[in-house]
């Protein structure tokens, strides 16, 4: 590999892997997953400066070189079972190595944007899970692998007969001398912030149906209060017993501040704090108007699903063999603290409703699907029970109903059910995506909006991004982005943002003329979708086809104007996109120079946000370089 440019190395991994996919048989999935995870880091490498002398940079470069070395060395088919085990170990090794290298990066010192940090956290969680699926690590061989580039002939089968010497694991980041799993710190953002390229803000501003973002105005005389010291002591004692039975400490960020239990359905309130939905809903329903943790007055009672935290909790439970609260066979449900609640009556009611979903009577079916929608928005327990009662296949069939109300309630019920992580797989297995896309194309506006929100929820799974992207959803989402209500446009923007994280979907979005749609959003007089448009453009800017389309659509002058007059976050994102367009492109550099970008960029390099200063400074350095080249040429 020539040079040590991290973005170029990532591109080479993606480029090299494209020629391997048709030849890999036993390890095709491992290779594809690894390449997808590396590709998702491209935005990180665009933001970090090249510091070749820093140890974390060397560790990261070495881990990526190991990935490329492994992918290029894979045989068409392993010659023996031993060879297959050797390759499996190599995948485990490079996966573990990359995750630890990512953990060693000093993100705060580098002022990495929250959007990119969020993506890195997700990639790290996926890498940890992937490494652990291979089984326990051989520490002696891992020690050897971490102290040097990947050895292709490293054979785990012969490790017992080798005298490797003193055990020594190279310290990557904060990794101790024994292998342990560390979860990333979960960053909580203010749910009321506008879209600025950060994933949590996208989630917060996605105005999904009221079924997900519920506003509570009901009041009762009995006020709900935070636990007393005695109650907290009792809860902590229960939690300690739970942790003792699990044999693992539950991360504090995973516990609801009200119940002190492991959260199943975490939601963000207006102050940015996260709580278990049922407990914060009860708090609000009891007449409280303040945030339980901060005591700040809640500006609204919207509860925004914290998808990222829910995913991390689910991954943590899987990693540590901790049972997520779920329905028991005897009609009872087990809570995280070990307590059991009888729900046999709820089960009977839900099962009766599910049977009516297939009724020949349109009125009976309409009433049942409406009630399922209502129940599915109330609690995680209901989402579990409804799915276990077999409602998902029946709801998918109703997506093709000619009755508008039935179709709206069916797609919204699926949206609500998808909030529970385990239901996503059931929805995908039921073949829901084609029907959801059809509703997105031709349903009522409310049905189209909730279809977009459903696709976003389902697309949180990596494999699902590929399936949804190939289903024809992206052109339909781009259309909604242009003709929908404000809520519909935001739902479409959120779904498109998440789908375009997967590199293969960026070309589909470009072919669906997303660039033209986003440019229109940037130039509308209302300016209500500028943040969303810039966020999606920043994701697309790593795609060559998207860059060409942006230049052809005359996006550069609009971006330069935004660096002059936009809000601080808009200026930051505009500068970041301009930098992506101008890297290694002298024509685009000359263009922004002619259009007078130097003055606003100079101002931004002095008075912008920290990230904006970095982007503007890098652009000015490029402009200075082309100016010197031009002078020399004369």
Image (cartoon, grey):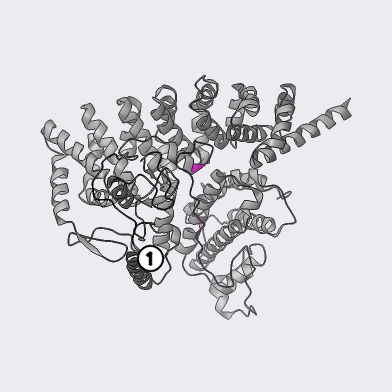
Q: Quadrant of the C terminus?
A: top right
Front residue (pair 524, 217)? 217
Q: Residue at x 17, y 51 (%)?
A: 346
Q: What's the residue at 29%, 45% (across, down)?
A: 287
What stretch of residues is rendered in magenta? Answer: 177-199
Vertical side of 249 occupied by 549: above or below: above
One can see residue 400 in this view: no
- The residue closer to the viewer here, 114 or 192, is 192
Magenta segment main secondary structure: loop
| Residue at numbered disc 1 | 321
In percent of width and height, residue 73 lies at: 60, 56
| Residue 599 visible in this rendered orientation of the protein | yes
Q: Is residue 140 magenta?
A: no
Pick out the residue farthest to the front. 221
Percent coordinates x, y for residue 425 in the rendering:
34, 49
| Residue at horizontal 74 percent and vertical 28 percent from the top | 598
């Amino acid at each position: 590999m020539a040079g040590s440019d991290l973005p170029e190395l990532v591109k080479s991994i993606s480029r090299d892997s494209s020629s391997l996919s048709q030849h890999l048989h036993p390890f095709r999935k491992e290779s594809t997953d690894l390449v997808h995870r590396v590709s998702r880091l491209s935005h990180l490498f665009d933001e970090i400066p090249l510091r070749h002398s820093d140890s974390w940079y060397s560790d990261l470069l070495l881990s990526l070189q190991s990935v490329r070395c492994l992918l290029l060395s894979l045989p068409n088919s392993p010659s023996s079972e031993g060879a297959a085990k050797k390759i499996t170990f190599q995948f485990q090794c490079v996966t573990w190595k990359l995750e630890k290298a990512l953990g060693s990066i000093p993100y705060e010192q580098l002022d990495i944007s929250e959007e990119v940090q969020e993506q890195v956290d997700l990639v790290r969680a996926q890498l940890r899970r992937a490494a652990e699926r291979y089984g326990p690590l051989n520490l002696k061989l891992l020690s050897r692998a971490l102290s040097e580039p990947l050895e292709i002939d490293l054979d785990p089968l012969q490790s017992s007969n080798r005298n490797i010497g003193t055990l020594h694991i190279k310290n990557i980041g904060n990794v101790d001398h024994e292998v342990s799993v560390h979860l990333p710190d979960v960053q909580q953002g203010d749910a009321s912030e506008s879209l600025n390229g950060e994933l949590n803000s996208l989630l917060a501003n996605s105005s999904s149906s009221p079924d997900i973002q519920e506003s509570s105005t009901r009041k009762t005389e009995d006020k709900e209060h935070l636990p007393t010291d005695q109650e907290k002591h009792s809860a902590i004692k229960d939690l300690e017993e739970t942790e003792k039975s699990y044999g693992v400490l539950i991360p504090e960020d995973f516990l609801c501040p009200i119940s002190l239990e492991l959260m199943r359905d975490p939601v963000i309130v207006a102050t940015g704090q996260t709580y278990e939905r049922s407990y914060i809903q009860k708090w609000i329903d009891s007449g409280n108007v303040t945030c339980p943790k901060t005591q700040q007055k809640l500006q609204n009672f919207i509860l925004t699903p914290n998808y990222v935290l829910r995913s991390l909790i689910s991954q943590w439970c899987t990693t540590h063999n901790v049972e997520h609260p779920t329905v028991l066979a005897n009609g009872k449900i087990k809570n995280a603290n070990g307590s059991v609640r009888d729900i046999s009556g709820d089960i009977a009611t839900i099962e009766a409703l599910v049977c009516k979903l297939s009724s020949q009577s349109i009125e009976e079916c309409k009433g049942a699907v409406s009630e399922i929608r209502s129940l599915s928005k109330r609690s995680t327990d209901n989402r579990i029970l409804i799915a276990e009662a077999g409602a998902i296949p029946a709801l998918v069939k109703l997506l093709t109903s000619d009755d508008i109300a039935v179709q709206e309630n069916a797609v919204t019920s699926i949206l609500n059910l998808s909030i529970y992580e385990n239901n996503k797989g059931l929805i995908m297995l039921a073949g829901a995506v084609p029907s959801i896309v059809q509703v997105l194309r031709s349903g009522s506006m409310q049905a189209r909006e909730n279809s977009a929100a459903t696709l976003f929820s389902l697309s949180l799974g990596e494999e699902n991004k590929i399936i949804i992207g190939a289903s024809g959803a992206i052109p339909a989402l781009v259309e909604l982005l242009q003709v929908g209500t404000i809520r519909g446009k935001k739902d479409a923007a959120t779904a498109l943002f998440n789908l375009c994280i997967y590199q293969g979907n960026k070309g589909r979005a470009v072919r669906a003329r997303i660039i033209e749609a986003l440019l229109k959003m940037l130039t509308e007089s209302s300016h209500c979708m500028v943040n969303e448009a810039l966020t999606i453009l920043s994701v697309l800017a790593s795609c060559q086809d998207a860059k060409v389309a942006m230049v052809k659509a005359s996006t550069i002058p609009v971006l330069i104007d935004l660096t002059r007059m936009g809000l601080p976050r808009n200026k930051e994102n505009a500068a970041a996109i301009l930098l992506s367009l101008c890297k290694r492109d002298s024509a685009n550099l000359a263009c922004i120079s002619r259009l007078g970008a130097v003055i606003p960029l100079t101002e931004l390099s002095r008075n912008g946000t920290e990230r904006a200063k970095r982007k503007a400074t890098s652009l000015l350095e490029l402009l200075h370089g082309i100016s010197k080249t031009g002078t020399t040429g004369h």
